Every structure is written in structure tokens, then in C-alpha cells.
Amino acid sequence: MSRRDDTASWAGAYAPYDLVKELAVAVGVIALLAVVLTVLFSSPDDRPSTVAQWSRQMPVDFTTTAVAELDGSSTTAGYGPPYNHNGDGQHIGPVRLQKWLGVSHPIDTANDYVIDPLRSVPGNTALQRAITAYQTAPAKLQSTWTDAYTKALGKATTGSGGSVNVAPGAYGPVPVMMNGLLALAQSGGLDGALLTSRQFYQTDYTKPLLFMADGGLLAQRAQAQHLLGNQWGMMNETGSYPGQSWLWLYTLWYQIEPFKSSTNADALVMLLMGVLSLAFICVPFIPGIRSLPRHIPIYRLIWREHYRAQQGT
Amino acid sequence: MNFTASGTVGAVFNLNHPAHVVHWHFIQLSVANIVVLAAMLVVFALALVLPFPGAARRRGSGS
Amino acid sequence: MSVVPPSKSSWTARTRERAVDALPPEKLLPDGQPTYVASWIYVFGVATLASLIVIVGSGAILSLKGPAWWHVTGVGHFFNSIHLWAVELFFFTMVIHLWGKYWMAAWRGGRARVWVTGAVTFVVAIPAALTGYVSQQNFDAQWISTQAKDGLNSVGVGAFFDVTDFGQMYSYHVLLLPTAVIALVVAHVLLVRRHGVVPPFTLEAKRLAAQPPPVQEGRATSAADAPPVRHGAPS
């Protein structure tokens, strides 16, 4: 392949070597190691969070997130593809793969997270009137209500039973809607509604997960477990278990500039890791990289018996 | 708030507590990951230097 | 041996002949190795393979009772733990194997495809593991999926690979990606059998020239010498 590749076929001696026995022994050893590690350490299984738990433990955070979903100011609302067209997503120069691959999993945050679940609540005419009042109001008025309510939530207190109390203000029908949604969430009904809104059998948790990720509960738990991005969390596991340490180079880039402060950090890191992975696959063809082993003679340790035998003859 | 499942019944060591993290400049690594990485380096070094059995058999095959 | 007169148009006969030409039985399963295979670094390939076998075995047991089983029984949790630790052992041994093969420049002598299949296996093993982590149906899965989606969405992959879609991720994890990893590992191992384990670097001629001339009888010292005593393998 290269003019320096003087590797000829081995025409030297062979010694008995039982490959099948070696594999059998290896499987036995690895299985035993896995069992020993299991007996010593087991494995982590932190219970998942639910929307019900979130709304009960952090009702102000839940309500603030719900208002953001309603008025389109949440992360998911402005995400862009693959969820909606409200943003262009990330890009690298003129290459906008996120935008070009389109909306494949449409999420309309106002309807999916607030209006439709509230419409399914039976027997609460005041709530239904509030929803109608909101939907028929002009957009500017809707924004006035949600902006004022969001500001008030910044100083909200939690009442007994997990209710949210804000100072009196001109919020229109928004408080009635939000209190209705909070009650639905705290009863567990919103978890089910978000999951089975399209069909009975469902294995796609995108909607409830994105809703929770827009709020603070998952991030709060993650921070306690050193799983945040700026904690090198990609490599870590819950508890004190080893994590995906092979992701060290993926997470390293996020910690340094220009990636750290870039709005296109994800795309840049994915591009860089794509290039490095390709280079890794193509090592035999890269000058310099492919000849380094010859110059740093770790091979002399590996083949010392062979070289000694050569010198001995 | 205790979110941990009880599935670790039977484990000799309970690792279900927040990790100890080592900070060095901008690098943050959990102790568990450091142990894994250190173990890899140690095992690699040992693999290079420890004698491999069967030397006499290999010498015999050459003559 | 053909049971009918061989036909040039028979795909079966052509496939068989090509397979046997490339890998006759004594090459597919040799009972000897070159005498330079004399280091513990050589066991990390088979250790990686063994880890993969334990991963698949423990994964098969987990799939017998479905994805929720391990959360509610001690036996299920036991096999989940085996599966997790086997994955750690898999990456542990694979990376050490990779380090050894790099410092041996094991792609030499027409073995580039061996390196390439091995490297692609490593790259494919990463999403194989990721799909497992997001299929756990616990808090770790919730967090990893809501974070990983951003990286994948940023380059358009999220449009057809949704890490928050448990059903899709479970399918990739249990069937598609293990099949890809196993196919790559099989190709990798067959290529190693085909080409043999890479011979040592030849030391510089100057150093060899400084040594006493080699004794030729019955003992091979380099590829250029006369055919040696063999044990098992044809090349």
C-alpha cells in the first residue's frame, strides 16, 4: 500500500494455539467478571419522573412552563424542525440539515400541551368558557395576558395542596386555564393525555418528555447527579456508577471555545466528531498517523520474544 | 426526594449516591470513570510487559 | 465435492468455491499461530468478542420478559446488571485491543480492511449503547434522550431517529444495531483469519547486519527465509 510497507507474509515457524479453547475460556472469564461486578455493585435504576410528580413537587415551575407552551416562548415551541417551523434550528455555514430534513414529529405546544388536554376535562363549564375566551381573543391581547401572568409567576407562592398563588392582576382567562391544567396534571391525567392523544397503543414518549424537559425538574435531578452538559454529564451515570466514558471526546468539545458559547454547538460538535470518526476509520491511509507506531516502538515490547529469537539465530 | 429504586438489594457496595467528582482545570471526571480509565491504562501496560505462557513450546516449534 | 456436474452458472457452486478458496477449513480454524503471537495484548480481541457474547446473551434473557421486567424483579435486575457490566467490559477490552492494534500498525500487509471493519464496529457500537441507555425506561433514559436529541436534531438525524421514541429506540437496540455490530465483527474476524495476524515490524537492516549471520537449518527468522516448520496454519 505505501512504499514503506515492507510487510511480507509470514514464512516462519508456527506453534500450537487453540483458538476455540481460548474463546471458551474468554467467555467464561468475562461472564464471571460480569457476575462479580453485578454482585458487588448491581446497576442503577433511578425512577423516572412523571408530569404528575413535576406538577406536585414544583407547581410554580410547572405552571410557568405551561404558560410558555401556551404563548410559544418555551424551548420546544421555538425549537424548529423536527417539531415545528417556529425556528430554523442549527446550521454550519450555509448547510442547514436540521431545517432541510423537515418537521417529522409535529408538536404544536399551545394545543398539544394546554388547549387539547383542557378541552378533554369534562363537566367544568367555567374552564371551557375560559379556553374559548382565550382562543377567540386577538393575539396581542393573548400575549398581554400571558406576559403579565408569567411576570406574576416570578413571585408566586405555593398554597396548600400544591396550588399556585399569584398577586391579583389583569391576566384574562389564563389563571383559570392554568389552574385547570395544574389540577389535571396533579391527578395524573395529563401524563396519560399527552401519551395517548393520537392512538391507544403508544410507545412514543416524545411529547411528555419534551414538556418536562422545558421545565426544571429533570435538570434539577440531573444536576444533583452530575449529568448536566457543563458537568461533563454525557460521560456520567446516575449514582457513583461508571458511565459512557467512551463519550469523553464528544463532551470535551462542549467545554471549550468556540463550541461552548456557540448557538450551533451541537452541529459543530457532531461535524467535528464525524470527521474524526472518519479519520479514525481511515488511519491506514493517513500519512504520519499510520507511520507513528514505527517511530514509537511499543511494538518492541509486544514482539520482544520474536526479536530475541531472531538475534539468537 | 428519594427517586432510587430498591433494585440494588443484594449489592455488596451501594453506589446509589451522588458521585464524587474530581475537578482539574476545566476537566470534571467522576471517580468511577477515573477508575475505569486508570484501569485501562494499567491493564494495557501489564499486557505489554507480562510474559505470555508457552515460550518453550514456541522455541521448540522453531527448531 | 459437487453432487451434480458443476455448472458455470450455478450461484451456489460459485459461492462455495469462492468461500473455500478464501477460507479453506485449515485457515478458518487453524490450530496454530505464528510464533510471534506471544503477548497478552493478543487476548483483547477475543476478550471483546467474549464480552459481546455475554452482552447478547444477557440481552436475550432481558428481552424474554420485556422491557419493564427488570424494574420489578430481583432476577430481572440481576440480568440487567450483567448486561450493563458486560457493556463496560466490552468497551474496556475493545479500546485496549484498539490501542494494541494501532501500536502494531496491524493494517500492514494488505490488512487495511481488518482495521476498517474494527473501527466501524467501534463507531456503530456507540449508537448501539446509546439506544440501550435511552430504552431503560427510568430517569437516566429520560435525561439522556432529552439531551441527545439536540445533537441528533442539529444535523437532521432527529428527523428519522427519535431518541425520545421508546418503541423506535428499543427496536434499534434489540435488533437493528446488534445485527450490524455482529455482522461487522464476523467480517472483521474472517478477515483476520484470511490475512493472518500481522507479522512484526522488520527491524532496520543496519541493526540486523550488526548481528551474527542467522543459522538457516530448519529455523525461519524472517519472511525472506526458506519455508519453516509449520504447525497448523497455511499462511
Image (cartoon, rainbow, N blue to C red):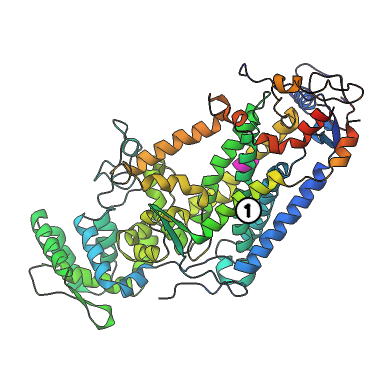
Examine the image and state in which quarter residue C71 appears: bottom right
Residue appearing at x 61%, y 58% in the figure: C85
**In the rendered structure, which segment of residues is drawn in magenta?**
C179-183
Residue A273 found in image quarter: top left
Q: In the rendered picture of this protein, how many numbered marks are placed on residues?
A: 1
Residues packed near mark 1 inside 10 Å, few (<14), some (14 to 19) or many (20 plus):
many
Secondary structure, magenta segment, majority class: helix
Residue A272 x, y percent position in the rendering: 41, 36
Residue corresponding to mark 1 = C89
The foreground one among C75 and B16 is B16
Residue A100 against residue A148 in the figure, above or below: above
Helix, strand or loop for disc 1: helix
Q: Nearer the viewer, residue A100 or C48?
A: C48
Magenta stretch containing residue C59, yes or no?
no
Q: Residue at x 8, y 58 (%)?
A: A141
Instruction: Let me know if residue A189 appears in the view.
Output: no
Q: Is residue A58 left or right of residue C78?
A: left
Q: Quadrant where the N terminus of chain A lies?
A: top right
Hey, which quadrant is residue C181 in on the image?
Answer: top right
Subunit of label 1:
C
- Residue A247, given in percent of the width and then of the height, sits at 48, 48
Residue A94, position as x, y percentages in the image: 29, 30
Q: Is residue C14 above or below residue A98?
A: above
Task: Tell me the residue at 31%/71% (across/down).
Answer: A55
The percent coordinates of residue B59 (x first, y second) are 87, 36
Screen quadrant of the C terminus of chain A: top right
